[in-house]
Image (tube, coloured by chain):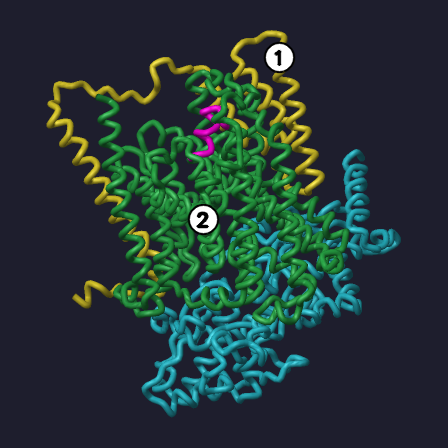
Chain colours: A green, B cyan, C yellow
Amino acid sequence: MELIGVLSPMSILLCFLGVLIGIIFGSIPGMTATMAIAIFLPITYALDMIDSIGLLIGLYVGGISGGLVPAILLNIPGTPSSLCTTFDGYPMTQNGQGEKALKVGITASLIGGLLSLTILYFFAPLLASVAIDFSSVEKFLIIIFALTIIASISKGSLLVGIFSGILGVFVSLIGTFADNNEMRLIPPGLEEQLVYGFSLLPVLIGLFAIGQMLIEAEEGMKPATHQNIDLNKGEKSRFKFRVFKNQMVNLFRSSVLGTFIGILPGVGGSAASITAYSQAKSFSKKPSNFGKGEPEGLIASESANNGLTGGALIPLLSLGIPGDSTTAILIGAFLLQGIEVGPLFIPTNPDLWSGIVYALIIANIVMFAMMFFSIRYFAKIVYIPKYIIFPIIIVMCTVGSYAINNGVMFDVWTLLLFGLAGYIFMKIGIQIPPFLIGFILGAQCEKYFIDSLKGNGGDLTVFFTNGPVALVLWILIIGAFVYAILDNRSAKRNDARDAS
Amino acid sequence: MKKIVITTFILVTALLLSACGSESNASQDDGNNVDLSRVRVVIGSSSTGGDTYQNAEAVSRYLEDEMGTNMKVDAIGAVKAFDELSSAKDDGSTVMFFHDMAYLGVEYGAFKEENKLENWTIGPVVAINPGNGFLTSGEAPYDTLAESAEWLNENPEETITVAIQAGGVSEVIFDGYYLWAKEEFGTGVSDRINVYVTGSQEDKNQALWDGNADIIHGSIGANAEYTKDEVEDKIKMKFLGLTASERVEGYDIPTMAEQGIMVNGKEFTFDKEFYFLMPKNVDKEFADKLDQAVQEVVGMEKYQEDLQKNSYITNYIPASESTEYLLEKRKEVNKIIEKAPDLDEIAQ
Amino acid sequence: MEDLLTVELSFSEYHLIFPRIVITILLILGAIIVFRYFYKRMKLGSSKKRDFSFFIATYDKTKLFGSAILLFLYPFMMERLGFLISTIGLMFFMTLLFIGKIKKTALFTSLTNALATTFVIWYVFGQLFDITLP
C-alpha cells in the first residue's frame, strides 16, 4: 500500500501523538497550536523529516480543532480562530445542547479539513500563483471586508458596535510600527513593556474568561440553569448527522472561504472564521437566530477554521511563503532538516509532498475519532461546579499568558487588565466580540493600508483603480454593510414587537 | 533530585519514542562542563525560519553536549532579547545570539543607545551568512548591481526602487550601493534610486511581485529557490550580487566587490556575522568555557556540514579578539552611515 | 481634489498616519453616540431619573472584590514565592471564597482542588513540555 510506503509506522504513531497533544493545547485557554509546534520544533531535528511532518501536522490539526471545546462549553475561545464558535456554540450549551454542539463542531471541522486538503492536493501550485496576485490593496480590502462583521454581529445599537470595533483597532495599534521602528500611543512609563503592544492571547482570554468570572462573582457564583439540565434531554438535543442536511452549501462555502483566506499570505487565520460566519449569516434563511444557538453559525466557524489548515499550507509548499503564523514555524522544521521550501518544493520532493497530504488526512480523521468518541466526557465539564472550574481556568489562563511569549510577566498583567476591562465593558455596553475582532485585525489593516500607499506615493485612489478584484471586494464590502444595517433594523423592530 | 529523575525519565521516553539511534549525552570528562542545568539563548529575531534562528539552533545543539547543559533557543526579537540580557543573572544562564544588526540597529537609531556593544561582554564570533545580497525579477534589463546603475544612467526616465528593512544589514548594504552610484554617476542617477521600507523577507518578495519594488534585499538561503530555471516567469528572480568578500561555493553570483562597487575608496564588502553577547559582568569562567566550547564545535565536521546545508560557513573569532574586531567593523560601517541618505528623503 | 486623495508620506511618520485616521473616526462616532443619548433623553423629558447603576442590585460584594483582590495579588506572589506556592494559595482561597462558607467539606474541596490542579499543571507543562512557568 502506498500509504505505508510513504509514511513510516513511526510517523503515523507520531501523528496520533501530535493530534492528542494538539487537542490538549488547543482546548486549554491560552495555549495554541502555534505554541505546541514551537515547543516540539527543536525535538524534530532528531527525527526523520517524514516523522517530524507526522508529528507537526498532527499538532497543527489537533491544535486548531481543540479550540472549540472551551468555546462551546465555557464561552472562552481556546484559540483566536474559535472566537466565532462561541457566538452560537455557547448559547447551544445554555440551551442544554452542549454535547450536540460539540459533535456538530467536530464534524464541521473534519469536513472543512478534508475539503481544504482536497483543494490543496489538486490546486496547490495554481492557487499559490493566484495568491501572489493579491497585492496589499486587495489584502487591505479583504481585512475591511472581514471587519464588516462587526456591523452584523452588533447587538442593539449598531453605532455602539462599530465604536467598540474601532476601539479594538485603536488598542491594537499601541506599540511599535514595524517599518520605521517608531513607537506610538504608549502610555508614558510603559514603553518597555509595550514595545510590541499587547499580546493577542492574554487580551482574548482576559476579556472572555476573567471578565466572565468577575461577572459571575458579582452574581454570587450561583449554578447556572443549564448546569441542572440533562445534556441529552429531548429529541432536539441529540446529535444526528441530519443537522447537516440543509447545510451542505454552508459547509462548502465556509470551508472554501477558510481555505482561500488561508492561502493569502499575511492575512491571519482568525479572518477565516470571521468572514465565514458573517457570510453564513448573510445567506441564512433565519439570520435572526444567529447568536442564539444556531448550528449554522457554528458550522460556518468551525469548517472555516479547519479549512484554513490546508489553505495555509498552499503558499508554504508551493511558494515557500507561510500562510499564517503556525505555518511560519513549520518552515523552521524544514530548514532544520536542510530542505528548501520554495516554488520547486513539490516537484523536487514528491515523497515528502504526498507524505504531508497523507499526514493531513490521517490527522483529520484521528482528530475526529478522538474527539467524537470522547466528547461525552468532555461535555461533563459543564457540570463541574463553578467554584471549582473558575479557579482552574484562571490558573490555566495565567500559565498560558505567561508562556505565550516564553515567559513575560507583563502578559499576565495584560490578562488581568483586560479581564477588568471586559467586566467594565459589559457594564457600560461596549461590545466585546466587535472589540476583539477589531483588535485581531487592526494591525494587519494598518500594515496593508500603509503598504498600499507606499507602493503608490500616497495616492488613495489606488484602492479603487487597482483592477477588477478590488472592485468586486468593494461591492462585497458595501453589500455586507448595507445588509447589516437592514438586518439590525429588522431585528430591532422584532424586539420592539416582542416587547409590546 | 526529583526534578532530575523526572527530567531523565522524560528524556528517555522521548528518545525511545523517536527511536533515533542517538547515543548517550555528553561525555562527562569534558573540561568545558558548566554548572548550569539550563542556558537560555535569546535571539534578536522573532522568526524561527530565519538565518539567526538556524545558526543559533545549530550551534546550541552542539554546545549542549560540549558544555554538559541544556540550551533552549528563544526567538523573542531584538528589543526583548536586549531587555532580557540586561536583566539577566551574571552566571551565563541567559545569553544572546545575534548578528551585525546588534550594533547597526543602535547606529541607525532602531535600538536604544544603552544596547551598544560597549555595554555587553562580546563572546566569540561563530559563523557567517555569506549569501546576503540583492535580487530582481527574472526579466529585469540588468544582471548585476553595477549594470542596474548603468541602466539608470542610460535611461534618464527610469527609476529603481529597492526593498529593504530599516536599521538592519539590508540598509547598510543598500547604502553601499547608493553611495557608489552617487559617486560613479552623480546625483542624476542616485536621485532616481528610491527605497521601499518593509519588514520580513516575505514582504520583500511580495513587494517585488506586486511591482512595488524593482530590487529586493534577500539571501541565498531564503531566495535561491526562486532563481532556478524551472520556476515560472511570474515569480522568477535573479541575483544581482552578493555582499560577502568571497563568492559562495556552488553559486555563480558575483560579489559586489567584483563588480567594482567601491565606497570611500575601498571595495565594498559586508560579511554578516553571528556572535554571542553576554551581560557586562558575566562570570569569567562561564565566558571562557563558552569560548572554548565554541572553538571545539566550530572544528567539528558534522557541525560544518549542518551549516553547509543552508550555505552558512563557520567563522570562529575567539572572544579575546572579537570585541576589537567588531568595534573596528563598526567604525568602518559608521563611515558609510555618516554619508548615507536619509530614509525620509528616499522612501516613497 | 487630487490633494484630498493623496496622503503625505514621510518615512519617519509612517507610524502616525493610521492612528490619526482611527482616532478621528472614534471621536466622530463617540460624538454621535453622546449626542444621540442626550437627544433621546431630552425627548423623553429630563424628569425621568437615570436608572443606570454599575452593579446589579443583589451584587455579592465579598466574592466580587475578594476574587479581584486575589487575582491582582497572584502575579506579585508569583514573583516572590514562585509558581507552586502562590498557585496553591490562590486556588485554595479562591475555591473557598466561591463556595462561600467555611466548613470541613469546603476546606477539603478547596485543598484538593488547589493541590491537584497545581501539581498537574506544574508536571505536564513545566516538566513534560518544558514550558517556562512563572
Q: CA distance from mark 1 to mark 2?
A: 49 Å
Q: What x and y, as percent, mark residue C83?
A: 63, 32
Q: Main secondary structure of the magenta part?
A: helix
Dot 1 corresponds to which residue? C107
Of residue A453 and residue A107, the one placed in the foreground of this image is: A107
Q: Name the residue at 52% across, 12% down.
A: C100
Of residue A364 and residue A187, the one placed in the foreground of this image is: A364
Dot 2 corresponds to which residue? A254
Looking at the picture, does residue A447 appear above or below residue B233? Answer: above
Question: Does residue A493 show up magenta in the picture?
Answer: no
Q: Name the residue at 62% across, 12% down.
A: C107
Say if mark 1 contacts mark 2, CB within 8 Å. Answer: no
Q: What x and y, as percent, mark residue B244?
A: 60, 78
The part of the image, by quadrant, that contains residue A156 is top left
The part of the image, by quadrant, that contains residue A433 is top left
Looking at the picture, which amino acid does disc 2 mark? Ser
Q: Secondary structure at mark 1?
A: helix
The image quadrant where one finds the C terminus of chain C is top right
Looking at the picture, which amino acid does disc 1 mark? Leu
Q: What x and y, as percent, mark residue A92?
A: 46, 29
Of residue B200 and residue B87, the one placed in the foreground of this image is: B200
Looking at the picture, does residue A335 appear above or below residue C27? Answer: below
Question: Does residue A94 show up magenta in the picture?
Answer: yes
Of residue C95 and residue A158, the one placed in the foreground of this image is: A158
The residue range painted magenta reads A88-97
Looking at the picture, does residue A321 appear above or below residue B5? Answer: below
In the rendered structure, the residue with mark 1 lies on which chain? C
For discs 1 and 2, the disc positioned in front in the rendered view: 2
Which residue, as the protein is rendered here, is positioned at the far top?
C103
Which residue, as the protein is rendered here, is positioned at the far right?
B29
Q: What x and y, as percent, mark residue A378?
A: 60, 30
